[in-house]
Each structure stands twice: as C-alpha cells, then as structure tokens.
Amino acid sequence: MPKVSVIIVTYNSEKYLPDFLDSVFNQTYFRQKQIAPDIFVIDNASTDRTVKFIKDTFPTVNLLRNVNNIGLCRAWNQGIQMTSGEYVLIINPDLILDQDFIKQTLKIIEQDQTVGSIGGKLYQLRVRSLDEDGLSNLEKTNIIDTAGIAAQKSRRFYERGSGQIDRGQYSQEEQVFGISGAAVMYRRSVLEQVKFSQEYFDQDFFMYQEDIDMAWRLRLAGYISIYTPKAIGYHHRRARSFLKEKDRHTISRHRRREFFVNYHSYKNHLMLLRKNSLAINILKHLPFILFYE
C-alpha cells in the first residue's frame, strides 16, 4: 500500500499540466524512496486536450474520465475511494509544488495522530502568456495566496495572508482552523471517520467552501489542522485572470460567472452554519454573526 496517494481533479487544465505534473513527479520524497508516485486524476469532462496530454506525456498516471462535470466534491470522493494511500494529498492542477512539499508535510502529520490535515504556504502564481501550443508561461511571486484558513466569531472564513507580500509574517508552524483545498494532505483514517454514507466531501456543496466544511468537521471530531511554512507551493487562482479583460462579451460572461460563483458561495456558507454550528455557540456569537450577514 502506498504511503501517499495524490488526487487531482481536472477540467480544461491542459495549460497548467506540464509544470504541475513535473513538480509532483520531482518530489524529493518519491526520489529518495525510489518509488513511483501514486497519482490519480479524475477529469470532469474536459473539452480541451487535458486527457490526451496526460495519456501521451504521463502514461503512468491513473486516469478516470467522467462523461459529465459532476462537481469537485463528487470527483474528489471518487479519487479517495479508488486510492489506498495512508495519506491523501488533494491538489488543484493550477499549482506548482516545491520539491520538498510532500516530505515536509509528511514529517509533521506522521508525528502526531491528532493532526487530521496539513498544508503549507502557497504563493500566487501568475500566467504571463500562452505559447503556440496553448500551454502557460508561469511566473512565481512572493505574494501569499494562502497560509491556511482562519475563522472569526462572525463565521467569516478567509485565507490567511492572501494578497500580502511575504515578509516572514507567516514563518511559524502553527495550528489553523483549516487548510485550503488547493493543496491539503489528509490522514485517510480520519476521512473514513468523518464521512457519511459514501461521501467524504459533502456533495451538496458541488464547489466552493467544501474545504471549510471538511475542516470544521475534522475539528468537531477532535482533530487539528496544521500549517507549515516549510511546505511551499505556487497557486494560480483562475478567478483573478478575468479582472483585466475588457471585451463586452467577456465581461458579460464574467458577470454570469460572478453570479454563479456568488450564488454557490453564499448558499454553501449558509449550509456550513446549519450543518456544523453548535446552538450554544450561535447564541454566544449571534451579534457578530448578524453584523457580518
């Protein structure tokens, strides 16, 4: 049985895959152990050349292609069910991992059985341009994307450090509310403990805030989430790539997308409160919650 199973959900992700998959295969942990990475890709009905690229360039990767886009949570659940690693690393394909990412996260999670999830410091990754094959030319930055998820009494959840230049303000290993779903390692035994029926991630979420829901459920089950600055990654949040586009058709599409994003984000926010809040804490923090809402 592999120690770590890497699960990736793709949807029209071809432009990121060369750098992303290279960074997974080049992990120090796999090279030192002289083992092949256990990678499982679930493709949610991509219409670009994502599937062909993986088959042609990385033939050892396990690949499941869904005929429809079934959503992020259902696809993650498929990956967890079809892998067997003691630890599950879930990562988005628009990432580049530092070569020691898995080594550093494993070092911590193996030492403490109360750690249910662990993640590292992700920086923003910018797309400078696309080459003639449609693949991205990527630029790493020193601007923080996330240093773990924080929670406030108002039930506002946010990515710590997002948009800040890294000046060492998140240089300490510490406990956080949760870890961003962009790159998070879970202990499989904990996922088995908190799942309901065959769902690890709640499929009612489809997308957005499912990582917060999982983090909250882990805490309610008595487990903690750890942030380590020694595990580094670079993440391109695709939502930012539309900000400078001025074509009126693009703007129209973006507005429709904004409605879709805002609708699911707020719907899922209310689901989070209903599912995971204890009544006593809701009453205790009600002024903060009402002010935020």
Image: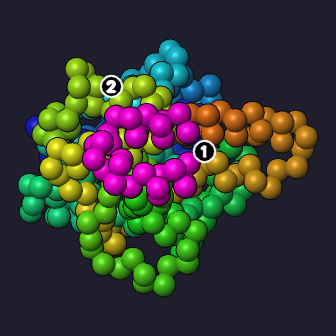
Q: Residues within 10 Å of mark 2 (few under 14, many from 20)?
A: many
Could you say whether the residue bearing mark 2 is in a helix, strand or loop? helix
**Residue at horizontal 63%, vertical 61%?**
126
Q: Residue at x 45, y 31 (%)?
A: 205
- According to the picture, the residue beneath numbered tag 1 turns out to be 15
Is any part of residue 86 visible from this angle? Answer: yes
- Label 2 to label 1, Cα distance in Å? 24 Å
Quadrant showing the N terminus: top left
Left or right: where 257 falls relative to 157: right
Residue 104, quarter of the rendered image: bottom left
Indicate the amino acid at tag 2.
Answer: Gln
> In the figure, 269 relative to 178: above or below?
above
Q: Which residue is nearer to you in this view: 73 or 290?
A: 290
- The answer, for residue 62, to whether it is visible in the render is no
Most foreground residue, 200 or 277? 277
Is 158 displayed left or right of 24 in the figure?
Answer: right
Main secondary structure along the magenta-highlighted residues? helix
Magenta residues, as a range? 266-293
Residue at the image position 22 percent from the left and 20 percent from the top: 197
Residue 37 in the image: x percent, y percent? 26, 45
Mark 1 crowdedness (10 Å alpha carbons): few <14, some 14-19, many ≥20? many
The furthest residue to the bottom: 167
Residue at the disc numbered 2: 78
